[in-house]
Image: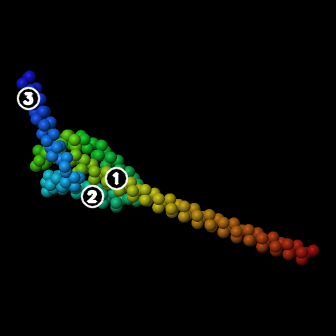
Amino acid sequence: MAQEAGYEQDIGSIHDWARQIVWNLQKDMTFWDHVNAFIAAVDWHETWILLLILFELLLLGFTIYTQQNWAIQSVLFILTFIIVTCAQYINQWCFDNWQLFSNQNYFDPSGLFITVILSLPLVIISLIALVLGLYNASQLVIQVKTFEFKQQLKAKKKLQDQQKESQKNSKSVKKENKKTQ
Protein backbone atom coordinates (compact mmCIF):
# COMPACT_ATOMS: atom_id res chain seq x y z
CA MET A 1 0.00 0.00 0.00
CA ALA A 2 2.77 2.43 0.93
CA GLN A 3 4.69 1.21 -2.10
CA GLU A 4 1.71 2.08 -4.39
CA ALA A 5 1.47 5.58 -2.89
CA GLY A 6 5.20 6.08 -3.50
CA TYR A 7 4.81 4.82 -7.05
CA GLU A 8 1.91 7.24 -7.72
CA GLN A 9 3.94 10.08 -6.22
CA ASP A 10 6.89 9.23 -8.49
CA ILE A 11 4.59 9.13 -11.54
CA GLY A 12 3.10 12.47 -10.49
CA SER A 13 6.52 14.10 -10.20
CA ILE A 14 7.60 12.64 -13.56
CA HIS A 15 4.38 13.95 -15.08
CA ASP A 16 5.04 17.43 -13.63
CA TRP A 17 8.62 17.32 -14.91
CA ALA A 18 7.46 16.34 -18.42
CA ARG A 19 4.80 19.06 -18.38
CA GLN A 20 7.47 21.64 -17.42
CA ILE A 21 9.70 20.54 -20.31
CA VAL A 22 6.82 20.79 -22.79
CA TRP A 23 5.86 24.19 -21.39
CA ASN A 24 9.42 25.48 -21.79
CA LEU A 25 9.54 24.20 -25.37
CA GLN A 26 6.25 25.89 -26.21
CA LYS A 27 7.21 29.30 -24.83
CA ASP A 28 8.86 30.29 -28.10
CA MET A 29 5.88 29.24 -30.24
CA THR A 30 3.55 31.85 -31.74
CA PHE A 31 -0.22 31.54 -31.79
CA TRP A 32 -0.15 30.28 -35.37
CA ASP A 33 2.49 27.71 -34.44
CA HIS A 34 0.12 26.39 -31.79
CA VAL A 35 -2.79 26.34 -34.27
CA ASN A 36 -0.70 24.45 -36.84
CA ALA A 37 0.50 22.01 -34.19
CA PHE A 38 -3.10 21.38 -33.11
CA ILE A 39 -4.23 20.79 -36.70
CA ALA A 40 -1.31 18.44 -37.33
CA ALA A 41 -1.92 16.48 -34.13
CA VAL A 42 -5.54 15.63 -34.98
CA ASP A 43 -6.43 12.80 -37.34
CA TRP A 44 -9.18 14.58 -39.29
CA HIS A 45 -10.20 11.34 -41.03
CA GLU A 46 -11.60 9.71 -37.90
CA THR A 47 -15.30 8.98 -38.35
CA TRP A 48 -16.45 10.55 -35.10
CA ILE A 49 -14.62 13.82 -35.84
CA LEU A 50 -16.12 13.95 -39.34
CA LEU A 51 -19.59 13.26 -37.89
CA LEU A 52 -19.13 15.98 -35.30
CA ILE A 53 -18.09 18.49 -37.98
CA LEU A 54 -21.05 17.40 -40.13
CA PHE A 55 -23.39 17.88 -37.15
CA GLU A 56 -22.01 21.36 -36.55
CA LEU A 57 -22.36 22.31 -40.23
CA LEU A 58 -25.94 20.98 -40.32
CA LEU A 59 -26.72 22.89 -37.13
CA LEU A 60 -25.30 26.06 -38.67
CA GLY A 61 -27.36 25.55 -41.84
CA PHE A 62 -30.50 24.83 -39.82
CA THR A 63 -29.86 27.92 -37.69
CA ILE A 64 -29.63 30.12 -40.77
CA TYR A 65 -32.60 28.39 -42.47
CA THR A 66 -34.89 28.84 -39.45
CA GLN A 67 -33.81 32.37 -38.61
CA GLN A 68 -37.38 33.70 -38.95
CA ASN A 69 -38.80 31.22 -36.41
CA TRP A 70 -38.02 32.48 -32.91
CA ALA A 71 -39.31 29.30 -31.22
CA ILE A 72 -36.90 27.04 -33.11
CA GLN A 73 -34.08 29.53 -32.58
CA SER A 74 -34.78 29.52 -28.84
CA VAL A 75 -34.65 25.72 -28.71
CA LEU A 76 -31.41 25.66 -30.69
CA PHE A 77 -29.90 28.31 -28.42
CA ILE A 78 -30.84 26.35 -25.30
CA LEU A 79 -29.60 23.08 -26.84
CA THR A 80 -26.20 24.55 -27.69
CA PHE A 81 -26.02 26.16 -24.23
CA ILE A 82 -26.66 22.78 -22.58
CA ILE A 83 -24.06 21.01 -24.72
CA VAL A 84 -21.42 23.67 -24.04
CA THR A 85 -22.24 23.62 -20.34
CA CYS A 86 -21.87 19.82 -20.27
CA ALA A 87 -18.61 19.88 -22.26
CA GLN A 88 -16.59 19.23 -19.10
CA TYR A 89 -18.57 16.06 -18.40
CA ILE A 90 -18.43 15.02 -22.06
CA ASN A 91 -14.66 15.53 -21.97
CA GLN A 92 -14.33 13.40 -18.84
CA TRP A 93 -16.39 10.58 -20.33
CA CYS A 94 -14.40 10.75 -23.57
CA PHE A 95 -11.13 10.76 -21.59
CA ASP A 96 -12.22 7.58 -19.80
CA ASN A 97 -13.63 5.82 -22.89
CA TRP A 98 -11.68 7.12 -25.88
CA GLN A 99 -10.72 3.58 -26.97
CA LEU A 100 -14.37 2.91 -27.88
CA PHE A 101 -14.51 5.48 -30.69
CA SER A 102 -11.06 6.96 -31.37
CA ASN A 103 -7.59 5.92 -32.46
CA GLN A 104 -5.88 8.23 -29.98
CA ASN A 105 -6.74 10.08 -26.79
CA TYR A 106 -7.39 13.73 -27.61
CA PHE A 107 -9.10 14.47 -24.31
CA ASP A 108 -6.85 16.14 -21.77
CA PRO A 109 -7.97 17.18 -18.27
CA SER A 110 -7.86 20.87 -19.23
CA GLY A 111 -10.45 20.24 -21.97
CA LEU A 112 -8.65 22.12 -24.73
CA PHE A 113 -9.59 19.68 -27.48
CA ILE A 114 -13.28 19.48 -26.57
CA THR A 115 -13.35 23.26 -26.31
CA VAL A 116 -11.86 23.76 -29.77
CA ILE A 117 -13.71 20.97 -31.56
CA LEU A 118 -17.13 21.19 -29.84
CA SER A 119 -17.70 24.22 -27.64
CA LEU A 120 -16.13 26.91 -29.84
CA PRO A 121 -18.15 26.02 -32.97
CA LEU A 122 -21.37 25.82 -30.94
CA VAL A 123 -20.70 29.18 -29.33
CA ILE A 124 -20.04 30.67 -32.78
CA ILE A 125 -23.30 29.16 -34.08
CA SER A 126 -25.15 30.61 -31.06
CA LEU A 127 -23.55 33.99 -31.73
CA ILE A 128 -24.68 33.82 -35.37
CA ALA A 129 -28.20 32.94 -34.20
CA LEU A 130 -28.13 35.88 -31.80
CA VAL A 131 -26.98 38.30 -34.51
CA LEU A 132 -29.65 36.99 -36.89
CA GLY A 133 -32.26 37.36 -34.14
CA LEU A 134 -31.21 40.94 -33.44
CA TYR A 135 -31.27 41.74 -37.16
CA ASN A 136 -34.76 40.25 -37.53
CA ALA A 137 -35.95 42.14 -34.46
CA SER A 138 -34.60 45.40 -35.87
CA GLN A 139 -36.34 44.72 -39.19
CA LEU A 140 -39.57 44.07 -37.31
CA VAL A 141 -39.22 47.35 -35.41
CA ILE A 142 -38.66 49.15 -38.72
CA GLN A 143 -41.79 47.53 -40.19
CA VAL A 144 -43.89 48.43 -37.15
CA LYS A 145 -42.67 52.02 -37.12
CA THR A 146 -43.29 52.35 -40.88
CA PHE A 147 -46.80 51.01 -40.39
CA GLU A 148 -47.41 53.44 -37.51
CA PHE A 149 -46.10 56.32 -39.62
CA LYS A 150 -48.41 55.39 -42.50
CA GLN A 151 -51.34 55.12 -40.10
CA GLN A 152 -50.54 58.57 -38.70
CA LEU A 153 -50.38 60.01 -42.22
CA LYS A 154 -53.74 58.42 -43.08
CA ALA A 155 -55.26 59.76 -39.88
CA LYS A 156 -53.93 63.28 -40.59
CA LYS A 157 -55.22 63.16 -44.15
CA LYS A 158 -58.60 61.92 -42.97
CA LEU A 159 -58.73 64.69 -40.37
CA GLN A 160 -57.77 67.30 -42.98
CA ASP A 161 -60.41 65.96 -45.37
CA GLN A 162 -63.00 66.12 -42.57
CA GLN A 163 -61.96 69.68 -41.76
CA LYS A 164 -62.20 70.69 -45.42
CA GLU A 165 -65.58 69.03 -45.68
CA SER A 166 -66.82 70.75 -42.55
CA GLN A 167 -65.51 74.09 -43.85
CA LYS A 168 -67.35 73.52 -47.14
CA ASN A 169 -70.49 72.62 -45.24
CA SER A 170 -70.20 75.67 -43.03
CA LYS A 171 -69.67 77.92 -46.09
CA SER A 172 -72.64 76.41 -47.88
CA VAL A 173 -74.76 76.84 -44.76
CA LYS A 174 -73.68 80.49 -44.53
CA LYS A 175 -74.56 81.02 -48.20
CA GLU A 176 -77.98 79.48 -47.71
CA ASN A 177 -78.55 81.63 -44.66
CA LYS A 178 -77.64 84.75 -46.66
CA LYS A 179 -80.01 83.72 -49.42
CA THR A 180 -82.86 83.18 -47.03
CA GLN A 181 -82.40 86.48 -45.37
| Residue located beneath label 3 in the image | 7
Question: Horizontal and vertical percent for residue 83?
Answer: 28, 46
Few, some or many C-alpha atoms within 10 Å of disc 3 (few <14, some 14-19, many ≥20)? few
Relative vertical location of residue 48 with respect to residue 180 in this rendering, above or below: above
Residue shown at the point (12%, 39%) measured from the top left: 18
Q: Quadrant of the C terminus?
A: bottom right
Relative vertical location of residue 151 with respect to residue 174 in this rendering, above or below: above
Q: Quadrant of residue 11?
A: top left
Question: Horizontal and vertical percent for residue 131?
Answer: 39, 56
Give the mark nearest the N terminus, 2 or 1. Answer: 2
| Residue located beneath label 2 in the image | 58
Residue shown at the point (13%, 37%) measured from the top left: 17
Question: Horizontal and vertical percent for residue 13?
Answer: 12, 33
Give the mark nearest the N terminus, 3 or 1. Answer: 3
Look at discs 2 and 1 and give the one toward the viewer. Answer: 1
Residue shown at the point (74%, 68%) measured from the top left: 163
Between the C-alphas of marks 3 and 1, the distance is: 46 Å
**SS at circle 3:** helix
